[in-house]
């Protein structure tokens, strides 16, 4: 009997392992690490815009997660040729042969459609339309067009990643306003120094895949200069909500301290020109945006 039980368990183990692998691969298609910061800016923006009920925040974040996940899956489909050439991405579900391109595309479209339905039926149509615009901007404007044609891809394409605050504002208030555009601008100008720091760590891989990222086309020195310039530009942009009287002293202090740290790391990257400095700036830029949006909520409600 005991031997029989062990045999049955052994027979089930590969099936369980296979199911876990499939679930993990489909989750990978949605780019959950990227989503986490997008959802954080969504939730915090809602509490900047007002005092929404928890249910509305949950539904808005669910719709945002579905939209971002759909965009991520379609991005995997469109970039499968590039991913196969780069060491960092060649074991992703599609180039790794574990999920077919057609299945990934259908999955992405289904998630995007589900996002629109959830937001339109449970939140409002404006937030659903904005989320759909973000998805289409990411997969068609950035992934399909800009990423493969110009070193300014992340500058222009960054608008898609800056849509979550607009979705959140619309979900909370039912409309857009100049205040929402302040938050959009912050994420928009934050994107280039954040992404270019990452691109410096992967220059050789982008070159191998013939992706015209800034360090490939203009060189690493020019990329570091641009990182400094955009970091310097980002700081005054973060003070626009203060000038517009959306926030007060708590946020202004946080923006000043965080901006100073970001510019310091950008200048250090320009001076030292090593991978460690690029990694430090990239990791800090993630914390920078999260802490800045957290400071917005604290300023509004404390």
Image (spheres, rainbow, N blue to C red):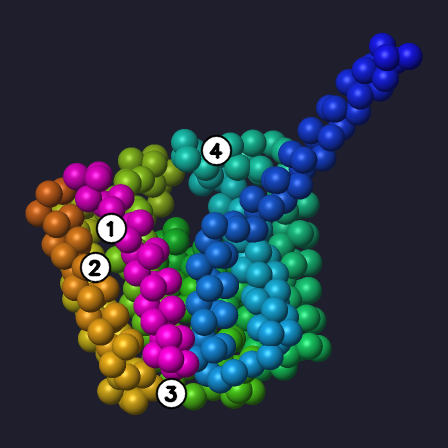
Q: Residues within 10 Å of mark 2 (few under 14, many from 20)?
A: many
Of circles 1 and 4, the one toward us is: 1
Image coordinates of residue 270 in percent, x first then y, are 12, 50
Of circles 4 and 2, the one toward us is: 2
Q: Main secondary structure of the magenta part?
A: helix
Residue at 30% over, 56% down? 285
Q: Seen in the image, is 175 located left or right of residue 279?
A: right
Q: Circle 1 — which element? A: helix
State the residue position of label 3.
Answer: 178
Q: Which mark is residue 90?
A: 4
State the residue position of label 2.
Answer: 262
**For residue 198, above or below residue 11:** below
Q: Nearer the viewer, residue 163 or 133?
A: 163
Total marks placed: 4
Q: Earlier in the sequence, mark 2 or mark 1?
A: 2
Q: Nearer the viewer, residue 215 or 227?
A: 227
Q: Circle 3 — which element? A: helix
Q: Which residues are magenta?
A: 274-302
Q: Circle 4 — which element? A: loop
Task: State the CA–CA distance, disc 1 to disc 4.
Answer: 25 Å
State the residue position of label 1.
Answer: 281
From this viewpoint, which residue is outermost toward the right?
1
State the image quarter where residue 56 is shown. Answer: bottom right
Q: Earlier in the sequence, mark 3 or mark 4?
A: 4
């Amino acid at each position: 009997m005991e031997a029989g039980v062990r045999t049955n368990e052994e027979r089930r183990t590969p099936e369980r392992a296979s199911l876990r692998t499939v679930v993990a691969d489909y989750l990978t298609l949605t780019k959950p690490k990227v989503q986490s910061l997008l959802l954080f800016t969504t939730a915090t923006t809602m509490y900047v815009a007002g005092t929404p009920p928890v249910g509305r925040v949950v539904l808005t974040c669910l719709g945002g997660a579905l939209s971002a996940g759909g965009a991520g899956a379609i991005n995997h489909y469109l970039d499968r040729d590039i991913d196969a050439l780069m060491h960092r991405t060649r074991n992703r579900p599609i180039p790794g042969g574990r999920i077919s391109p057609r299945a990934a595309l259908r999955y992405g479209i289904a998630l995007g459609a589900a996002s629109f339905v959830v937001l339109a039926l449970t939140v409002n149509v404006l937030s659903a339309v904005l989320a759909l615009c973000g998805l289409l901007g990411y997969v068609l404007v950035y992934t399909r067009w800009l990423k493969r044609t110009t070193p300014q891809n992340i500058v222009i394409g960054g608008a898609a990643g800056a849509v979550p605050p607009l979705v959140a504002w619309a979900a909370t208030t039912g409309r857009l306003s100049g205040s929402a555009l302040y938050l959009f601008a912050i994420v928009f100008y934050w994107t280039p120094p954040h992404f270019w720091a990452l691109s410096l760590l992967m220059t050789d891989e982008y070159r191998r895949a013939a992706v015209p990222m800034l360090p490939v086309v203009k060189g690493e020195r020019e990329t570091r200069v641009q990182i400094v310039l955009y970091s310097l530009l980002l700081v005054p942009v973060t003070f626009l909500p203060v000038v517009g009287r959306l926030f007060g002293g708590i946020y202004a202090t946080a923006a000043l301290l965080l901006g100073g740290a970001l510019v310091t790391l950008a200048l250090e990257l320009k001076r030292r020109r090593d991978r460690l400095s690029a990694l430090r700036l990239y990791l800090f830029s993630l914390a920078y945006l999260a802490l800045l949006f957290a400071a917005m909520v604290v300023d509004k409600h404390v």
